[in-house]
Amino acid sequence: MLPCVRLWLWISAFASLAGWGLSAAGQLNRLGYAVAFAVFAVFIFVFRGFIAESKVQSPRSKVGIGIERRRLWTLGFGLWTRLLRRFRRPLPFCFGALAVLIFLGGAIYPPGNYTGLTYRVARVLQWLDHGGWFWIHTVNYRMNDRACGIEWIYAPLLLFTKSDRGLFLVNFLPFLLMPGLVFGVFTRLGVRARVAWQWMWLLPTGYNFLLQAGSIANDTFPVVFALAALDFSLRAWTSRRASDLWHSILAAALLTGAKASNLPLLLPWAIVIFPLVPLLRRKPAATGLVILLAVAVSFLPNAVFNARYCGDWTGSNLEDARLAMKNPVVGVWGNGFQLVLDNFAPPIFPMARRWNENAPSLMPHSLTVAADKYFDDGFFSLGELPTEDWAGIGFGLSILLAASVFAAMGIRAPPAGVNVAAIPSLLRRCVLAAAWISLLAYCVKSGMTGAARLIAPYYPLLVASLVAGAGQSEIVRRRWWRLLSGVTLALAFVVLALSPDRPLWPAKTILSRLSVRNPDRPSLTRALKVYTTYAQRHDSLAGVRDLLPPGTGVVGFVAGPDDADISLWRPIGGRHVEHFLLTDPPAQIRRQVEYAVVGGFNLKMRNTTIEDWLQKNSAELVASTNATLKVSEGPQPWFVVRFK
């Protein structure tokens, strides 16, 4: 498992370094990546001497080589046998079955994560089109101020394949590494091996991990970086190897490079690694190179550009003012409310629409006022089914975890006999406590809704702190606990199969027939509308694209900050999209494009009409149609216009 983790860290680091480096040279293209691949191969060949511990190796004869090959063959066969034996057990088997279903869903369905299509994939296409990263002229500020970690891995995939169908692998591959890393971190932090073994298979079945593993969302993507940063630093307490610390530093940098909201998680990592800093002095040259690489792949480059272009390293000047929490006390209990609400919401909630309509009136007035004043829209919102847009670890794991904690309170067990003698007990307790301090820091600063989804990298440490007691070893033996864990796994299969993003059943076919037979059932109509919209989300403006004149190489896009332009790029590599604001001078638009697509919903929100806009910009209407980007907005008008 560790070689795979190291490989993933170096692949991720190379992708980020190549992205920034080629952008600086204006060569974010195939030739640039070919050179970067060659340089990276040479770098690994030279740097491997610094990473690997020096060992005295005796000359190998032909007989010795033959014996070694037979031993490797035997070891490989033994590993395969042990792997098959392991997956005969219920928990590993269920994880394996879920992984297969996730892969099938990702392979069958094109990516449909809305935010991923709206700004993550879209801005990568912009960078590739312009030869490198640049501050995009757009109303969609997220294309500029957000971290670029996952996007730099997308870039070569989109460049060489001209398709977004394989992008889900960027989430799926690290998902497979979660169980081993969870076990390693849990046991080194004092969780008993029996308990850690159960949770290494259960924790990845959290709804957010399952749903995003086959997606292009980026909330659970950095979870492996958070685990690897702690795992390698904790290993260094025993191994005393500088190479473990190098990988830990690299993982921590990638953690922040993926999402700025992960910055508070550096606290528990710093507590582990700070006493080990003297180990880094053994190889100062290699340590210096690793630190330089870590700086390049962290959030720091984004922070520098944010400070330059908008005057604030976080980019909050561009965001909705409510996204940055102004009242720390409200931030703590408001985010806490969201975490409880989203994680304990039923996995199938037919009354979600009624709840969303009436929840503000049912809550205390002070809570409603604070939610409107300090938080983004959708504070009380729930969905009929968990989706990757809002789900946390979910109902099943939350109930199982709560039951485990409460049941263990009445058990007096001997101290945990965990083999972590090299790691001081006080340090382990400080790390587990720091996880909650990190969560507190997040809550104090964030006014974004969907906290249960956004804190995905925090969950492993939070869960470890709750199951670290010696009594948990007794709890996991209880019959009721095993039954409840079985129910949790069953719910995970249900959630994965029913997911509107990638349903593993003929949803539209069945719901269409049921709607025809039962036209008076609004719930069926709503379900069909949701599944239909999600199925079309990867290419929601296909009808608009068909209205463009054949051979249009560059098209303008005048829409709102949450409108997706991905359809206008398809087929990828065949057309370029330029963003414009409603207030841009007509001459500026006319210099770059002849045809533009204009969103009617954006015009409505800006209190203007297409007729007024056409007259102001000396443009003419070519065609119009309706398209649905989001279920909440419904069908909206879209216009194709030509500048005279």
Image (cartoon, rainbow, N blue to C red):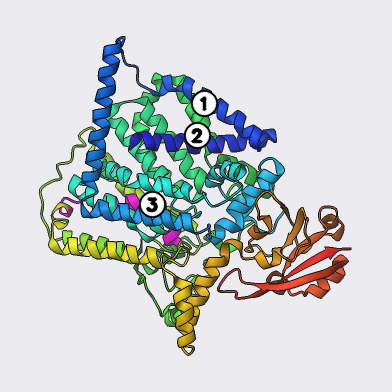
Q: Is residue 110 above or below residue 187?
A: below
For residue 52, what is the image quadrant? top left
Which residue position holds label 2? Answer: 294
Please tell me which of labels 2 and 1 falls first in the chain: 1
Magenta-span inclusion, residue 461: yes
On the image, the x and y values in percent for residue 168 come to 48, 51
Which residue position holds label 1? Answer: 41
> Callout 3, which amino acid?
Tyr
Q: CA distance from mark 3 to mark 2?
A: 21 Å
Residues at circles 2 and 1 in contact by the CB criterion of under 8 Å: no
Asked whether 96 or 348 is in front, the reply is 96
Residues at circles 3 and 2 in contact by the CB criterion of under 8 Å: no
- Range drawn in magenta: 451-472
Q: Residue at x 50, y 81 (%)?
A: 525
Q: Is residue 46 above or below residue 493?
A: above
On the image, the x and y values in percent for residue 318 come to 64, 56
